[in-house]
Image: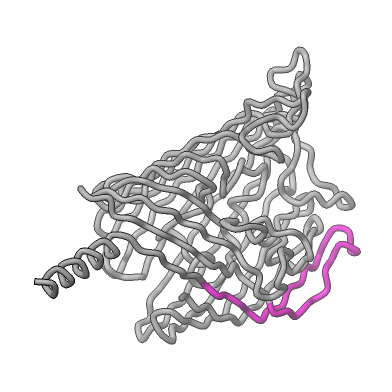
């Protein structure tokens, strides 16, 4: 009898433990690469070729989940960026990388839900994620030029956003699995959407959504994000919003086709985007372009618009080999009147080859280039990967990399 009771107790304990679990996972991603910029309208803004050993978005993830029964679950997900190359929160350009500064710096959420939908609270990935339409930088090569064009120009409120309530639709949503809707308040230095001082406004807010549709070999995606005011805007009599305050809207549309079958990794896709910034001051300032000496990079001040488009091909060669190619075009910016601003566009492309050594480890080689027009300076992914903090107007960025990624 005692043996039976002990066995039953052990079985109950095992069943209890089976209902919850904790995991530690992540990715180590590094390359040996060259970085240079040439052809700036001001020659002193060029950056001589540098050979470096660079981190390409390594991370460690802590996760815990509990089965609550009846198909529901709750848990926590904390993805923290790490810099294997510098062992601190600065990247190759010796600038702070916000995605490696704290625990959950890449993404952190508490969630509750089931296979239809999860409610997620925290800092979360939104605008930049492109799913199967473009995995060149996020999964294969560590970085890509097309994504950098999408996120430049007049910018968006955020590609990862804090203080966010998000609903993510899962497998039971069928063809719409992966779709999201979200909203939140702008945090700033004080958090909780509150003003940092009595003169600052506290109604900064953002919202958006991602509609994903997958049917056999067809993949569609529609992204939308809007934001009102900013966490540093100050109250001002007679202004629509506040001094230094602005609104943004952004739309991105994508379509992909898995030409070797729905289960294949081979895909060709196209995406296009439109973004708009509207200053809310009484003067409603128009677009202020970065100057050759100021070098404010691609998020410009004042009301304006940017747009562009691009194409991606990921082709599975078999034998665990893949080639990738992408090409992107950022159109000339437009000012507050809708007039095109000359010489503010850019073109970019990435080509690469990937060889998987196992299910967790692969090596790759890639070439990236961005060619800026004479009045603009799109850059690679900021301080974490670019060797140059500031890129000169008209510069062409050239990178050649040999790298390895290991998922654990």
In the rendering, at what x and y percent does residue 282 appear?
A: 76, 18
Which residue is found at the position 78% from the left and 21% from the top? 283
Q: Residue furthest top?
A: 238
Q: Is residue 198 above or below residue 213?
A: above
Q: Does the magenta run of residues contain 46? A: yes
Q: Is residue 377 above or below residue 260?
A: above
Dividing the picture into quarters, in which one does residue 348 lie?
bottom right
Which residue is found at the position 71% from the left and 63% from the top? 89
Q: Nearer the viewer, residue 123 or 253?
A: 123
Which residue is found at the position 39% from the left and 53% from the top? 75
Q: Residue furthest front?
A: 2
In the rendering, at what x and y percent does residue 301 appear?
A: 75, 38
Where, quadrant-wise, is the N terminus in this rendering? bottom left
Q: Nearer the viewer, residue 37 or 331?
A: 37
Which residue is found at the position 69% from the left and 28% from the top? 337
Dividing the picture into quarters, in which one does residue 393 lie?
bottom right
In the rendered image, is residue 397 in sight?
Answer: yes
- Magenta stretch, residue numbers: 27-53
In the rendering, at what x and y percent does residue 256 appear?
A: 38, 57
């Amino acid at each position: 009898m005692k043996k039976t009771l002990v066995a039953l107790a052990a079985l109950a304990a095992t069943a209890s433990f089976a209902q919850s679990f904790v995991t530690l996972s992540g990715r180590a991603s590094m390359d040996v690469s060259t970085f240079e910029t040439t052809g700036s309208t001001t020659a002193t803004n060029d950056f001589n070729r540098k050979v470096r050993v660079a981190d390409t978005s390594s991370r460690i993830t802590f996760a815990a989940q509990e089965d609550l029964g009846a198909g529901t679950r709750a848990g926590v997900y904390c993805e923290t960026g790490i810099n294997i190359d510098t062992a601190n929160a600065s990247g190759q350009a010796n600038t702070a990388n916000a995605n490696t500064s704290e625990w959950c710096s890449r993404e952190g959420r508490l969630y509750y839900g089931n296979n239809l939908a999860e409610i997620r609270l925290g800092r979360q990935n939104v605008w930049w994620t492109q799913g199967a339409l473009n995995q060149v930088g996020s999964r294969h090569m560590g970085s890509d030029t097309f994504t950098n064009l999408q996120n430049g120009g007049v910018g968006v409120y955020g590609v990862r956003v804090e203080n966010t309530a998000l609903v993510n639709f899962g497998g039971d949503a069928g063809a719409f699995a992966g779709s999201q809707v979200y909203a939140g308040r702008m945090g700033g230095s004080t958090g909780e959407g509150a003003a940092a001082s009595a003169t600052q406004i506290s109604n900064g807010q953002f919202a958006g959504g991602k509609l994903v549709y997958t049917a056999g070999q067809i993949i569609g995606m529609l992204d939308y994000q809007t934001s009102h005011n900013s966490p540093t805007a100050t109250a001002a009599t007679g202004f629509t919003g506040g001094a230094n305050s602005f609104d943004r809207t952004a739309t991105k549309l994508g379509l992909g086709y898995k030409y070797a079958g729905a289960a294949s990794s081979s895909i060709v896709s196209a995406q296009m985007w439109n973004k708009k910034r509207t200053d809310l001051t009484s003067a409603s300032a128009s677009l202020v372009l970065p100057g050759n000496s100021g070098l404010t990079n691609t998020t410009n001040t004042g009301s304006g618009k940017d747009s562009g488009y691009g194409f991606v091909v990921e082709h599975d060669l078999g034998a665990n080999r893949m080639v990738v190619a992408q090409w992107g075009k950022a159109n000339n910016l437009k000012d507050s009147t809708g007039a095109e601003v000359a010489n503010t566009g850019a073109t970019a492309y990435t080509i690469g080859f990937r060889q998987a050594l196992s299910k967790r480890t692969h090596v790759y080689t890639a070439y990236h280039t961005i060619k800026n027009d004479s009045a603009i300076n799109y850059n690679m992914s900021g301080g974490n990967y670019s060797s140059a903090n500031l890129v000169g107007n008209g510069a062409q960025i050239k990178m050649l990399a040999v790298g390895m990624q290991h998922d654990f």
